[in-house]
Image: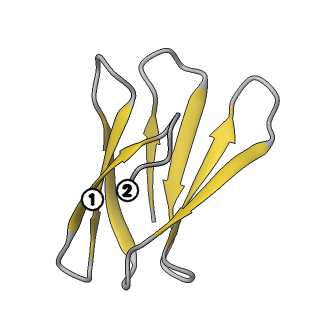
Amino acid sequence: MCLAVEAGGDIVCAGSSDPFNIFVWSLKTGQLVDIMSGHTGPVSSLCFSPSNGMLVSGSWDQSVRVWDVFGKNG
């Protein structure tokens, strides 16, 4: 449903509508490196912080979450 690319261009995140996860991909290797879960509805928006690798996600579950993509805190 949505995509965000990390400022360094190494990581892309994709939000999905079912299951309600965020998939983290390496652009260098093309490999899936992580799946982050926590939303209870479709993930409809993603945005990386330009300076620190933090990812913000919005969902139809009416929540906003902040993720440390490299440390997995959500």
Say which of 74 and 24 sits in front. 74
Is residue 4 toward the left or the right of residue 56 in the image?
right
Count of marks placed on residues: 2
- Which residue sits at x=52%, y=69%? 21
Q: In the rendered image of this protein, does residue 31 appear above or below residue 42?
A: above
Is residue 56 toward the left or the right of residue 31 in the image?
left
> On the rendered image, what quadrant is the C terminus found in?
bottom left
Label 2 crowd (10 A; few <14 / some 14-19 / many >=20): some
- Which residue sits at x=39%, y=27%? 53
Of the residues shown, which amino acid type is indicated by label 1?
A: Arg
Q: Which mark is residue 65?
A: 1
> Which residue does the numbered mark 2 point to in the structure image?
74
- Contact (Cβ within 8 Å) of mark 1 with mark 2: yes
Of the residues shown, which amino acid type is indicated by label 2?
A: Gly
Quote the CA–CA distance across marks 1 and 2. 6 Å
> On the rendered image, what quadrant is the N terminus found in?
bottom left
